[in-house]
Image: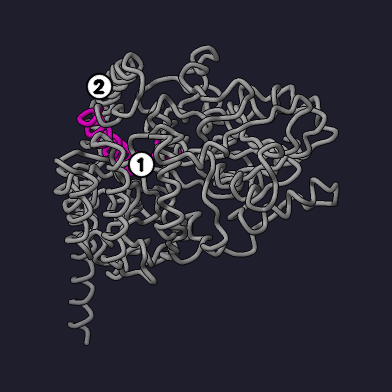
Amino acid sequence: MLMRKGFYLLQVYSQTVSFDGYPIVLTGEIATMSDTHGSSVVGFASAIPENYFRDWAARRFFRVKSDKYGRVLRAPYGLAKVEAALLAHGYTRNDVIIADPYKLDKVIGPNTRVIGIYVMDPLGLSYGSGIVYWILKLADLPYRGLPYIAKSFFQVINHPAIKRHKDHLKIVVGGPAGWQIIDTGRQRELGIDVVYEGEFEEDGPQLFDKIMKGEPIPERVVAHRPVPIDMVPTIVTPSIGGMVEVTRGCGRGCQFCTPTLSGMIRSFPFEGHIDREIKLNIEVGGFSEITLHSEEFFRYGAKGIEPNPDKVLDLTVKAYKLVKSYGDDHELTTDFTTAAVVKYAPKLIKEVSEYMNEGGTWHFIEMGIETGSPRLLRMLMAGKALPYKPEQYPDVVEEAIGILNDNYWVVVGTMILNLPGETDDDVVKSLELLDRISKLRVLTFPLPFIPMGALRRRDFTILDKMLDDPLRREFILKALIKSFEEAKAFSSLITRKVENFIVKRLIGYIAVSSFNLVLKRYKEKLGSLIEQYGEFKERIKEEVSRAVISIKLDRGEQDNNS
């Protein structure tokens, strides 16, 4: 297969070893650089705190595939794009390496001038780390230390090879979570020279040029605009999970979401771009499943909020045919959608699913539900429901999940607590939506919103405060119970891409045992909470009825007096 379709790729992987170090070394948190035995879903375990991962166990679980020189065989997609942009700018593979974080001593030396570190959660402040904190606390399990992904960041940035050569190199941190370094004010303490935020392809290579020339550089660089599609090169290192980017941006304008910074959705062409990355991931990466990555796949080719079904279906058919040309066991899937586009185009969902979920094969798909409150929707994410109104959103979510389930998609739906301006009534609306979708195939993950001020103070007591509040605690428990029940039901889907059979069985066994443990403990706690909340609601009703009677009496007295 490689000789038949990918000979041109072989040249990319010829390597000249530099014992004096590569001028530009790209790497990332160990947990982010790991392919977690072939399953990106299993990678969410990186949010578990370090007291559950001894170093010897972590090294085996968070393995990184690389050659003997330290060059990775697969990379996080964003880091592969950084490498591609530098190569397109004029650097060569003798200048740039995406390095195994376990082997930095092999690639860093006197010639090294830049260490680029790609981060997903360097300080353990992400939604994912917050939810794992809740999961363990509610199950009465100990939580000590940092989430492992954050610990693995510190293992990289404090690596002896970097410390040894710090006098002649600059550390550049970028990726989806670069904001954590800025917002906590820890950049100088950590010895980070530059934090890069935004898309890399246009402004990033120029920053690296300045560092290579020894010119002055700012401590923070923010990309000045979303990069035009024709400036984005294709990757040359296969991406973890067989990921292929088909769109950038979104355009719905949710105030808490990073893709908002990339503006309106833009779509990459199939010929010469998407097809090249599919071939690379199959022929060189060895993947049998390709994930077409998009913030909202069913809007591929759209010029605005409404989808362009012809464009989406055309992409799906072309990608399907290309993937299947490598064998019947090869599959195609996608990763993100919104409820609104599914509700708007059910026929499109059915047509696409016939290719992606061929023969009734189930796949996960992520959906940011975020809230059941039309008021919060209107205030913080007015574009989320378009072309529908915020008041219609709970109905839209329920119908969309049903449509996706009918077409063999298990929905992973995130819901956020503590959004700015949130009231108890907003939480009640989200609880009502949880009840409405309780019979559907959906994992409802509750995520904590932590205000920037708390992040700067590293004050995470807000997580405990939400657990102490009866209403919010009920929401968290209900959402997690639903998520773990569905995860248990689809445990084989979670581990289906794990490459090693023994590891697959082991992860499956640990996962199901963990699901059973937390479900038992959660349901015990929820039982007493429901009683408490029931009493609370009865008291509220009584107070309201008294108020109504009082108002009627007052009005009656006024009428008599008049």
* In this view, the mark in front (2 or 1): 1
Majority SS type along the magenta span:
helix
Q: Amino acid at mark 2?
A: Asn
How far apart are the alpha carbons under marks 2 and 1?
A: 32 Å
> Where, by quadrant of the figure, is residue 329 drawn?
top left
Question: What residue sits 57% from the left and 38% below the top?
Answer: 11
Question: What residue sits 22% from the left and 34% below the top?
Answer: 486
Viewer-side residue, 116 vs 84? 84
Q: Does residue 383 sit above or below 517 in this rendering?
A: below
- Whether residue 312 is visible: yes
Viewer-side residue, 511 vs 447? 511
* Label 2 close to label 1 by CB (< 8 Å): no
The question of residue 488 being in magenta is answered with: yes
Q: Amino acid at mark 1?
A: Ile
Question: What residue sits 61% from the left and 44% below the top?
Answer: 83
Q: Which residue is mark 2?
A: 516
Viewer-side residue, 281 vs 467? 281
Please state the extent of the stretch shown in magenta in the rendering: 464-491
Q: Residue 36 placed where, x, y %? A: 44, 26
Q: Secondary structure at mark 2?
A: helix
Q: Which residue is mark 1?
A: 290
Q: Residue 355 placed where, x, y %? A: 21, 48
Counting other residues with Cα less than 10 Å from the Cα at mark 2, is it few (<14), some (14-19), or many (20 or more)?
some
- Whether residue 425 is visible: no
Counting other residues with Cα less than 10 Å from the Cα at mark 1, is it few (<14), some (14-19), or many (20 or more)?
many
> Where, by quadrant of the figure, is residue 547 drawn?
bottom left
The quadrant of the picture occupied by the N terminus is top left
